[in-house]
């Protein structure tokens, strides 16, 4: 895939300087899931562009902001695994992807909820049990049209924490993307 990205909406940052909203960040996450699920035939997918013109970084004369799309790209680059793991089950509106880390000592599960409803997810491993504690990173917002603006506090940002989870009952926030990283023994 030589280049991919959204290209629509208000040109706030010059010619083709599209503003991206939370819904666009969630769409980027779903796109990454598709590329990952088809990594046997897609070995390269270049995000286009980087700054202002359909970019994930927006600038003004005095400031800079990481767009919602940039937040998602940073999340997956820094925290998602490298070796695809099959995901099955009835997921409804949720888009779920999973991967092992390169050393096969961590399992990451990414969940995108593009709806305004909270869901509950049940994670079952086919080999062994998942630990009850994990690291969690997420991006969420109150409105699918939330965006980040250079010089203003971020309305959409990446958060993280260590959590104790009941893998049979994991709450999935509305309008969110989350990555759970489990350390395997």
Image: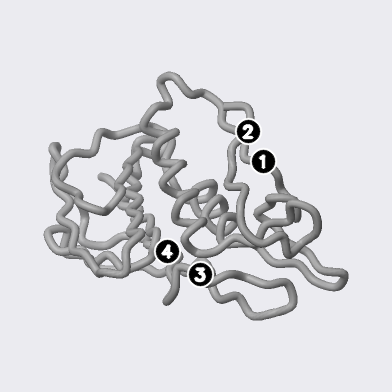
For discs 4 and 1, the disc positioned in front in the rendered view: 1
Alpha carbon distance from label 4 to label 2: 26 Å
Residue plotted at (38% across, 63% down): 176
Alpha carbon distance from label 4 to label 1: 23 Å
For discs 2 and 3, the disc positioned in front in the rendered view: 3
Residue at image mark 1: 48
> Where is residue 112 shown, x and y percent of the image?
35, 55
Mark toward the start of the polypeptide (2 vs 1): 2
The correct choice, above or below, for 52 with respect to 1 in the image is below
Residue at image mark 4: 138
> Where is residue 71 shown, x and y percent of the image?
56, 59
Residue positioned most to the top: 41
Marking on residue 3: 2
Q: Secondary structure at mark 1?
A: loop
Contact between labelled residues 1 and 2, with CB atoms less than 8 Å apart: yes
Mark toward the start of the polypeptide (2 vs 3): 2
Mark toward the start of the polypeptide (3 vs 1): 1
Residue at image mark 3: 145
């Amino acid at each position: 895939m030589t280049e991919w990205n959204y290209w629509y909406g208000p040109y706030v940052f010059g010619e083709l300087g599209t503003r991206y909203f939370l819904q666009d960040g969630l769409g980027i996450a779903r796109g990454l899931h598709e590329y990952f699920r088809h990594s046997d035939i897609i070995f390269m997918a270049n995000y286009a562009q980087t700054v202002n013109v359909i970019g994930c970084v927006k600038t003004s004369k005095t400031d800079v902001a990481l767009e919602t799309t940039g937040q998602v790209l940073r999340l997956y680059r820094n925290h998602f695994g490298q070796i695809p793991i099959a995901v099955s089950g009835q997921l409804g509106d949720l888009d779920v992807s999973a991967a092992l880390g390169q050393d096969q000592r961590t399992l990451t599960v990414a969940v995108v909820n593009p709806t305004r409803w909270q869901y509950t997810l049940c994670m079952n491993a086919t080999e062994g049990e998942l630990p009850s504690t994990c690291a969690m990173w997420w991006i969420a917002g109150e409105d699918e049209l939330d965006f980040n603006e250079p010089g203003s506090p971020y309305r959409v940002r990446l958060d993280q924490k260590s959590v104790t989870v009941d893998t049979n009952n994991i709450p999935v926030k509305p309008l969110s993307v989350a990555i759970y990283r489990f350390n395997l023994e």
